[in-house]
Image (cartoon, rainbow, N blue to C red):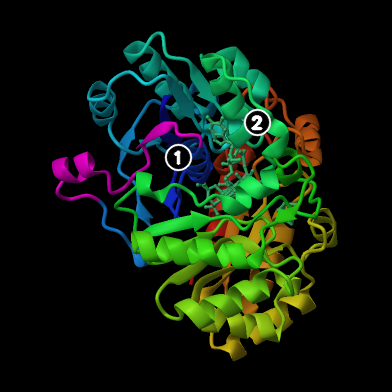
Amino acid sequence: MNILLINPWIYDFAAYDLWLKPLGLLQIASFLERFRHKVSLINCLDRHHPLLEQRYKKLPLSRKFDCGKFFFQEVEKPAVLKDVPRRYKRYGIPPDIFEQELSRMKPPDLVGITSGMTYWYPGVFEVIKRVKENFPSVPVVLGGIYATLCSEHARNFSGADYFVEGEGEIAVLKIIDKLQGVKRDYSDITLQRIKEDIIPAYHLIPHAKSAAILTSRGCPFRCSYCASPVLNRDIFVQEKSQKVLKKIEYLVREFRIKDIAFYDDALLVNAKNHIIPILEGIIKKLKGKVRFHTPNGLHVRFIDKKIAKLFYSANFKTIRLSFESTADETQKISSYKASRQNLTGVIENLSSAGYKKEDIGVYILVGLSHQRMDEVIESIKFVKSKGVKAKIAEFSPIPGTVEFEKALTKSSLPLQEEPLLHNNLCFYLWNKNISYEELCKIKNLTKG
Ligand code: B12
Ligand code: SF4
């Protein structure tokens, strides 16, 4: 079959390309190619899209390590977000470039669309609408995070024909087989083997200079605001370290990738058998050839002196730590990721390994139902007193989590029915403990 995969636009108040890659689609593409399907990709979030670069000579430049601002166009703010005093935008290639891409291809046999944050669904709907206008008889499959966490909303309103919740590789193969009338024994195809054998299809983004990878699925912890257990069906599996190394070497060799971001939820768990051999392998085989980044927060308490040194020697440039808060109540629901003492010790480990303190970013959560201004201010002050950067992570209420249920009891707004209200940049619309003005103060406090 000819399969077209699409990574939709982001509709949001803000978006920044932190090595953002459609990793789910790239994994599915690689898997389907093994079954001799022909796959193509339209990546609406490609900052280096050739047609975009051709048209606009003055695009926002890439910043450090291939991150950067997306091209955007302001769009009308949805009514439910009207009280957010910020402009609402569509990030990614202009729609006419998307249309140009569709019009120059022959109709595919199937279109697969991914979805990211639950509140980014307007971009997904826009893509489905345009695909249906161009290829009315082609079946459309929708998968990804929004489709999994808000499956009812997606089924009711998106206009797709098929829906996949959770991991998509085998599920999409089953849909294709059904459409083609192929009978197959799926018991042979286990997900663990798929993940280890599959190298995301970066050949579909041939000009990419950076890549995102996963070395595991899920997380063994259960923080009450996190969707990881829902998305991964309570599973935690890690790939074999030697296979991870092979993938990294392949990406660097074949695509001249210079920056790699780890998307794992729990990269440091079971360190002895996982991250340590990966780091040792990188130092041995790739030293200095590629830079690594951990935009997702790392588990503080696992970073001992040895791991800190290995990170530094392996060229890990972006280190983000999940601290969340100094307050006991928030620590408790965050699986006690790190006490003040833990954080202090780890910052010492990282700086004696060679890291400058100002290069270390520490995430602090803001907007959980119980949180008040003083807790957040105290956490920021504590983090800043250690000489490192405090980074705000605003709470996004996610269906299927305990904190979502708590948020429902606080909110007079329809959080359940309207995923736009899950936007992390507008928690103050439903959580009155912290106002927009206070959030601005909090953000100012992190600066300098
Ligand atoms: C990496 C990551 C990031 C990265 C990159 C973000 C990005 N936009 O890609 C960074 C660090 C930047 C980030 C930031 C944030 N994130 Co984040 N992030 C993740 C994480 C850990 C992994 C996502 C991922 O790429 N997984 C890897 C791929 C392979 O998995 P996948 O996309 O799910 O694909 C599989 C299936 O879904 C399916 N599938 C996918 N597409 C398709 C398509 C078809 C056709 C089919 C059939 C199947 C299918 O098959 C795939 C392969 O098995 C998830 C948690 C998680 N475990 O998923 C949180 C998560 C998505 N993030 C979340 C949040 C809250 C945030 C922040 C708001 C945090 C904050 N307050 O700052 C910010 C928002 C940033 C922004 N505006 O861009 C929430 C979601 C919130 C929501 N309402 O939807 C999650 C779920 C974590 C959580 N707390 O529970 N994040
Ligand atoms: S440790 Fe991180 S990924 Fe794991 S459950 Fe908690 S927030 Fe989610």
Whether residue 167 sits left or right of residue 54 in the image: it is: right
How many C-alpha atoms fall within 10 Å of the one at disc 1: few (<14), some, or many (≥20)? Answer: some
The three-letter code of the residue at mark 2 reads Thr
- Residue occupied by mark 1: 13
Q: Report, in whole angstroms, how far the alpha carbon at label 1 lies from the one at label 2.
A: 23 Å
- Residue occupied by mark 2: 148
SS under mark 2 = helix
x, y (%) of residue 3? 42, 27
Q: Is residue 148 above or below residue 60?
A: above
Q: Residue at x 52, y 44 (%)?
A: 27
Q: Earlier in the sequence, mark 1 or mark 2?
A: 1
Q: Residue at x 73, y 71 (%)?
A: 273
Whether residue 40 sits left or right of residue 150 in the image: it is: left
Report whether residue 387 is seen: no
x, y (%) of residue 1? 43, 24
Front in this rendered view, residue 338 or 201: 201
x, y (%) of residue 343? 72, 76
Say which of marks 1 and 2 sits in front: 2
- On whether ligand 1 comes within 8 Å of the CB at mark 2, the answer is yes
Front in this rendered view, residue 237 or 183: 183
The stretch in magenta equals 35-59
The three-letter code of the residue at mark 1 reads Phe
SS under mark 1 = loop
x, y (%) of residue 244? 58, 63
Q: Is residue 438 above or below residue 84?
A: below
Front in this rendered view, residue 229 or 394: 229
Residue 415 part of the magenta-drawn span: no
Q: Residue at x 68, y 43 (%)?
A: 191
